Image: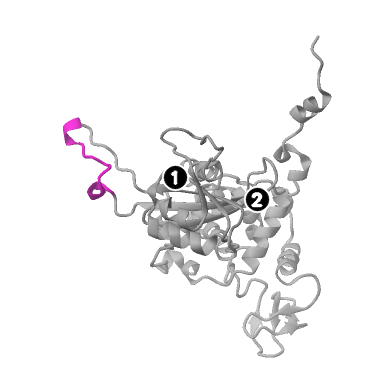
Amino acid sequence: MRDINISQVIITMSQHFLLSAKARTLSVWKVMELTDAQAFEVFKEVRWGAGEEVACPVCGAIGKHYFQRTRKQWRCKDCSHTFSVTSGTIFAFHKLPLRVYLAAIAIYTNAVKGISALQLARDLGVQYKTAFVLAHKIRESLMEKRDDAPLSGEIHMDGAYVNGHIRPMNKKEDRIDRRLAVHQRPDKRCVFVMRQKCQELAAGAVKTLTFVLKGENQEDVSKLANEFVKKGSIICADESNAYDPLHAKFDTRRVNHSVEYRADDGTTNNLAESYFARFRRMQYGQTHKFGNLYLANYANEAAYREDTRRWANGRIFTDIMKKCAHTLTNRDWCGYWQGNKRQTERLAS
């Protein structure tokens, strides 16, 4: 009878992190059970820390300002400005109870493939317009507070196109060559991703940066690599000619996806491909459509979910709350449904 290796059996039977109790440190129903006073204290502690000292969002004075208990507001001792716990943040001018916003962050946290505004509206019991703006405020905070420090080590790069599909005509004689530039849609965009590989074995990527381009071209790829990749790093890319200039400045390794998924020297582009797997599932299964005005925010959301895929949901919840509490009021999302919308898209070029 063949001998059985006990260590191999243990490794085979080991539980995935996301199935363990360590990954479940947050419960949405416990967040919804918070009273208004408890939700106020939670957001206050996340924004200013424990204690009685708070910072005025206008003059920046830190101290024990005069607190109006009935209105849950402070009056600054230096400039006499009256402010609340959400003043100057992405949630400024809120009308719903604060625990609803905490519940929205909790639901957003648990949606590992993203969440649609319609589903969020049903879960919170609010209008679609309210949930739409609320979800985008969270995405805006993730975008504003992302870490743009240069990547190092082994970097995987790739690009994927969105909003470029052209439905073929019913009859064959009426169809066009959709590969030609003249027949391409003008709102077609490329989501470009750079992912830093973890030094540990089989740990995947540790940091992801995304950008929106009009096309996967040499000029934009070279510019982004020079700005966000440290010298001496290894770059892994596919056969696209957009990455040809990188050979002059980086140790660039390529894999021809038209022939193979893994080169003979072991080079792959799997980290970038795994990001796009989550990105496409968020697109097809949840939001269904990405508007170009906010495409950069959607791409960054998928990057954030990839980077925090092995975090406990309680840790992700706290991290998103901190980002929201320290993101300044965004005028694009104040009066959005009254016509105050962003006018230009976020392009890296």
Residue 322: x, y in percent?
Answer: 67, 64
Task: Name the residue rendered at 69%, 41% in the picture.
Answer: 201
Q: Nearer the viewer, mark 1 or mark 2?
A: 2
Q: Which mark is residue 308?
A: 2
Left or right side of 180 for 324: right
Give the vertical position of 201 relative to 37 (above or below). Answer: above
Q: Secondary structure at mark 2?
A: loop
Between 136 and 119, the one nearer to me in the picture: 136
Based on the picture, tell me whether residue 179 belongs to the magenta stretch: yes
Left or right side of 141 for 35: right
Task: Name the residue rendered at 65%, 59% in the picture.
Answer: 320
Residue 329 appears in view: yes
Using a 10 Å C-alpha cutoff, classify the residue at mark 2 as few (fewer than 14 neighbours), some (14 to 19) or many (20 or more). Answer: some
Q: Secondary structure at mark 1?
A: loop
Check whether the beta carbons of the residues at disc 1 and disc 2 lie within 8 A of each other. Answer: no
Residue 126 appears in view: no
To which quarter of the image does residue 62 belong?
bottom right
Give the vertical position of 309 relative to 5 (above or below). Answer: below
The residue stretch that appears in magenta = 172-184
Q: Give the amino acid type for the residue marked by disc 2 in the picture.
A: Thr
The residues bearing labels 1 and 2 have C-alpha atoms spaced at a distance of 23 Å
Residue 262: x, y in percent?
Answer: 52, 35
All told, the count of numbered labels is 2
Quadrant of the image for the N terminus?
A: top right
Q: Give the amino acid type for the residue marked by disc 1 in the picture.
A: His
Based on the picture, tell me whether residue 114 belongs to the magenta stretch: no
Q: Which residue is mark 1?
A: 288
